[in-house]
Image: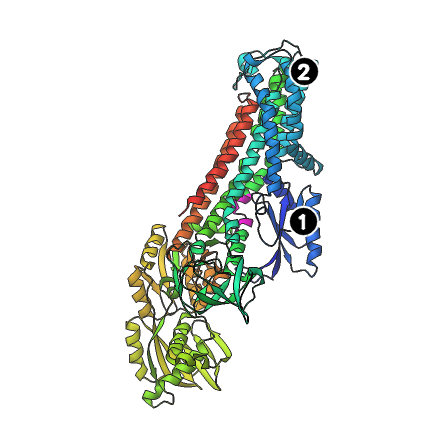
Amino acid sequence: MTQTVPPRHSGDAESERIELTIGGMTCAACAQRIEKKLNKLDGVTASVNYAIEKAWVTSEKLDDRDHLVDQLISTVQKAGYTADVPPESYDEESGTVGARDLRGLRNRLIISGVLTTPVVLWAMVPATQFDYWTWFSLILSVPVVIWAGWPFHRAAAVSARHGTATMDTLISVGTLAALGWSLYALFFGHAGDPSMRHSFTLFDEPYWMAGHSMGSANVYFEVATAVTTFLLLGRYFEKRSKASAGEALRSLVNMGAKDVAVLKDEGEVRIPVNELAVGDEFVIRPGEKIATDAVVVSGESAVDMSMLTGESVPMEVAQGGSVVGATINTSGRLVVRATRVGADTQLAQMAKLVEAAQSGKAEVQRLADRVSGVFVPIVLLLTLITLGGWLTFGAPAEDAFTAAVAVLIIACPCALGLATPTALLVGTGRGAQQGILISGPEVLEASTAIDAVVLDKTGTVTTGAMQLTSMLSARHWGGEYEDAELLRLAASLESASEHPVARAITNAARESFGSRSGSLPQPENFRNHAGTGVSGEVGGHSVLVGRRRLMGAAGVELPSEVDQLVTEAETHGSTAVFVAIDGVFSGVLTVSDTVKDTSAEAVEQLRKLGMEPLLLTGDNAGAAHRVADQVGIEHVVAEALPEDKVATIKDIQAQGRTVAMIGDGVNDAAALAQAELGIAMGTGTDVAIAAADITVIRGDLRSAADAVRLSRRTLRTIRENLFWAFVYNTAAIPLAAAGLLNPMLAGAAMVLSSLSVVGNSLRLRRFR
């Protein structure tokens, strides 16, 4: 699976992104080792995610992509793992965890549990012990430690071949050491005596407290088997939990329609959705899913967008309106024309954004990676120090061995490796279900420091559905063009623009001309003047539509009579747009916008999050202040060009503040990139969305506040996970080294720590 990743915040060259599914990873250290191996390849930058078992590799665009993929897979295999290119789409057995691997792990767990139960029972309940019970324990323990625990031993052997150590090394060495000591005690000590009995407590007093030891009569079959079973249980539930954590992304990908009724010459023909092409017209009946992004050709209906946006109220659509793939037609029959298919649809882009976010690493995760990289060698050193220390101070070998094994087992940094990726996986997946797309983990860290928010006006605070409210041609001052011709030429030019003002003028022309709307000529040499207007040629005429500044730059003189008209329009919150034809002023159009019903509430929510709002717009001061007063914003910057918006954000940053920018237009893209946190409204332009850190699919400004809350809560969950993972290891290792922790209890505690981290992350699924 290859996708082009647009560079963000820079002009980096286009790069190729390759995704690989990685098999055989058992801990965060495995992911780190693979990442290091891949990053050593020339021109390659790799990121490996242990939680979702995938690697993402970017490199300069190469002619021979297949060779690069083969090289990447070979590198991973040489490191002792498996790698493959994932399928183009998810199926029932794909995604985070392979069903086959999970079944194999479950079988090992079941057999291990059955064999371990009597071994632990005999060791922990002296009344159940009988003649030769230690020998029966040996018979049951060997399959558990060797066969059921083989995944740990294999991973440890792979690590040893590459001169490294992982937490599997700790597990393998610990369980084999417990088995080895028991064999020694059985064959060369007194543990093999038929009548041998011993008591058991979870908190045996060590030699330095009790002053005695059972010496070579003690066996640790229960430790070796129970630890193996506990760890298999933990790994099984860990994989199940990770699969559950990734369910949001898989459900997002799988929610699309499977087939579609396309209109052909012979009538309706039902075809698989992957055969649909741009331009095909198809029918959507009430209750059916919309197969792909499309524009309505005929019919009226209400479309349920909740699966993409979380918005429960259906959206009304009619001829000329847009619909999004995977949403549901709730009432009327629609005929639509496909505008985007396959990987270009909004649903597919959402999935890519979510998966790209899950592939990245926040600074806290990079810290955890650095710690885990040195943690295992340190633990092995501490184990040797524990063993040597006890022996040096005259303790029996059994007590020294018990303490050393407990250190090995309790120190496994499973929770540390799961702390960040599971929270990120759940948080970004839940965000996607709620219509909030987070571009990467660094966004989470940026969200905590935001104390100022800059809002664009049109399409962000207001509906963006502007309407033409008045029109006055220069004919009133002796000019050449009537109102109808003025509107036709202006609308023809504006039809090539995405700006809300342009849509208002174009829609007014189409309503005015009715069935003759198709007669609007196509503009030539169209040019967008960011923040001021547009220019081009229509029907052999040079046409200019825009603000007073654009007219002045083009040398167009405006009659003094229009000043009063413009002043009156701006007083009422409207925007004046001037039209010049063939270099001569030809008329003025006024358009107005309405504030969204939820904008005032959204501004208050942003303020409660500690973010001081500022309204930043290219519109006139009168319209800007009118909107600001309606939503409760005190600070306003009006008539700002794109470069002015960037300069305004830089000025705020120069004051030592951290800025979030919320916008939706082409002229907001630079400002979105300049801000520490860029939030794009999903109803806006593709350029704005590409420049943003977070995209909210709904046009509701409250979603921006939700996005900040989700980002902060996800980061808080990551920090909680890391805190408890660090505390667990640092607090438990000294207890184990002091001989106060039975190795079997240490194994159970280590499993519980990993499950607690995953469970804490899964709480994010309840975010509203």
Mark whose residue sits in front, 2 or 1: 2
Coloured how?
A: rainbow
Kind of residue at badge 1:
Lys
Question: Viewer-proximal residue, 238 or 673?
Answer: 238
124 versus 19 height, above or below: above
Q: Which mark is residue 569?
A: none
637 versus 119 height, above or below: below
Kind of residue at badge 2:
Leu
Is residue 179 visible from the viewing direction of this image? yes
Q: Position of residue 16 (x, y in %)?
A: 62, 58
The structure residue drawn at horizontal position 36% and vertical position 51%, both measured from the top left corner, is: 610
- Distance between mark 2 and mark 1 Cα atoms: 49 Å
Q: Which residue is mark 2?
A: 186
Specify the farthest residue to the front.
Answer: 266
Q: Residues within 10 Å of mark 1 (few under 14, many from 20)?
A: few
Q: Position of residue 523 (x, y in %)?
A: 49, 80
Is residue 6 visible from the viewing direction of this image? no
Specify the farthest residue to the top.
Answer: 195
Q: Which residues are magenta?
A: 357-366
Determine whether the residue tagged by mark 1 lies in a helix, strand or loop: loop
CB of mark 2 within 8 Å of CB of mark 1? no
* Most common secondary structure along the magenta stretch: helix
Q: Residues within 10 Å of mark 2 (few under 14, many from 20)?
A: many
Q: Which residue is mark 1?
A: 40
Question: Viewer-proximal residue, 108 or 284?
Answer: 284
Determine whether the residue tagged by mark 2 lies in a helix, strand or loop: helix
